[in-house]
Structure formats: structure tokens, C-alpha cells
Amino acid sequence: MQKEGLILKGIGGFYYVEAEGVTYECRARGIFRKEGITPLPGDRVLISLNEAGENTIDEILPRKNYFARPPLANLDLLILVVSVCEPVPNTLVIDKLLASAHFKGIDTAIVVTKGDKKAPDELLSLYKKVGITTFAASGITYDGIEKLKKIISGKICAFAGNSGVGKTTLLNAIDKSLDLETAKISKKLGRGKHTTRHSELFKLGEGFIADTPGFASIDLVADEEFLKEDLQFCFVDFIPFIEKCKFTGCSHIKTKGCEIIRQVEQGGILQSRYESYISMYDELKDKYSWS
């Protein structure tokens, strides 16, 4: 018997696939290994159920997007969880995640935590100006939890952010039955220990949300498709001004008369965003497409 399902997680060569409300343990057929393909959580797949032996994943249906690290496919929404303190926010890391998600066609939102320890207004204002859905939420006081539930409803979502920002606490607040393990902040390091050990999708109403290890930063160079020429279009606040730049193929760095630079000088584009752009462009500048 064959069914279509969704991979929730993969551990030790076994994949757990939800199909028609039931979760099945499956092995991937050997053909995937021969072709260098790894099934990922979020993949829609066709599975064969075999009462006399192992259930198998027969086919991975076309992906609309994927991340190799952490391993996730077919995301509708990437939620960046950022704390105002402990650990302090890093705008370069935030902007890298936003740019990578935009490049892959994934919607984004920013959730700011730990507003009880420090006022979140400056951080909230910064990314609201950029045009990103941004709001405060707490897994302790439950402020913002209903809004968070609303934006993830019916989607495949992932939480991203440094360890210790409160991702797992928010997940537990959204659905108490998850009862996921959380970690305290290390006073010495100023950040949390990773408690999530593998990527896994959890059912939430009509949608799914992933708790993932290592989704705190993005290696743009490791993404073979992401080139420096793509970067400007992955900053949503740059897009209204790109066509107004009078220089064809402009890098928007140190070019006198560049419209993007003019907007930064006049406050149309935030300085912190432009600094992130320069840093990311420098990371990508020696990378070439060999196709």
C-alpha cells in the first residue's frame, strides 16, 4: 500500500512520516543514497507500507525550498526569535537569516523576547522600519502568544535564532503538550546551551513547526546558488531604490552617486542594514557560479 506523507524527523537512518494522521517509521530506499539525495524533515514523500517488512520512502516529491543545515524542506515561514538581552541581539546574524530566507522565497517574521528584562522598543522599531513583521512575545507571561499562533496557523514553520533566546520556551507556550526541554543561559558565555539535537516538525493545529539545532546563522558561501549579484534583491528595503541607481551592475559599495548609498546617507535605508549588506557582500565577492 502506498501513501503520501510528510517527514517529521530522521534519526539513525529511520524517518518518521505522518500520513493521514498516522506516523510511520520508514527506511529510505537505497536509490536515494546512490543519487546523493537525503530525505529532509518537511519533505512530502510517497511511502510504501509493508506489514511483512520495513516501510519505505519510495519518492521525494518536488521541493519548493530547502536548507541543508539545519536539514529542513518546504518552509512557508521562518520566524527569527531575537532576545533583547542574554544573549544580546546581533543584527548581522538577523540580516543574514532574513536575506537567505528571502532568496529561497520563504516569508519571515521576527519575534522579540525577554522584554521583561529590557525594553524591546528599539529593536522592534528597527525591523518594523525595514518592513518585516516584528512583535514582542513571551513564553513566561504569554504576551504575544496568540498573535504568534495566528501567523503560524496552517503553515510549515521554523524557529531560528541563537541558543538561549527562548525558542523552545515559546514552543512550549504555544502548545503545552510539547513539553520540550529548555536550557539556562551560561553566565560565563552569555548564551544558552543547545537542547535541540535534531530537526523535528511538531504538529500545531493545521500546521507544523520545527525546533532545530544550529539555526543561529547562515553560511552564504556554502549555499551554491547564492551569489553576490543576488544579495541586493534579498534586502527588502533596498528593492524600491535598486532601479533608481544609475549604475548598471552597481555593487552599491563606495560608488559615488549610487542611489543605495544616497538613501543610507539620507536615512531611507538604515545604517545597520547597510553595514550588514557590506559584510555579506564581502563574504560572497570571491564566489563564482560554475554552471
Image (cartoon, rainbow, N blue to C red):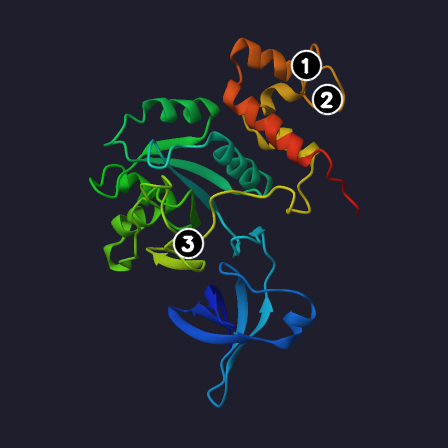
Q: At label 1, which amino acid type do we have?
A: Cys
The residue where tag 3 is placed is 210
Q: Position of residue 60 (x, y in %)?
A: 59, 65
Mark 2 and 1 residues: CB-CB less than 8 Å, in contact? yes
Identify the mark at residue 258; answer none if there is no mark: 1
| Nearest to the observer: residue 153 or residue 79 | 79
Q: At label 3, which amino acid type do we have?
A: Ala
Identify the mark at residue 219; answer none if there is no mark: none
| Nearest to the observer: residue 23 or residue 290 | 290
The disc, 3 or 2, on the residue closer to the chain's N-terminal end is 3
| Nearest to the observer: residue 185 or residue 290 | 185
Helix, strand or loop at label 1? It is: loop
Q: Position of residue 80 (x, y in %)?
A: 42, 40
The residue where tag 2 is placed is 250
Q: Position of residue 172 (x, y in %)?
A: 27, 52
Please tell me how crowded label 3 is: few (under 14), some (14-19), or many (20+) other residues with Cα within 10 Å. many
Q: Is residue 32 left or right of residue 9?
A: right
Q: At label 2, which amino acid type do we have?
A: Cys
How much space separates mark 3 and mark 2, taking CA atoms?
Answer: 38 Å
Find the residue positioned furthest to the right: 290
How much space separates mark 2 and mark 1, taking CA atoms?
Answer: 8 Å
Q: Residue at x 45, y 30 (%)?
A: 132
Please tell me how crowded label 2 is: few (under 14), some (14-19), or many (20+) other residues with Cα within 10 Å. some
Q: Position of residue 144 (x, y in %)?
A: 27, 37
Helix, strand or loop at label 2? It is: loop
Find the residue positioned furthest to the left: 141
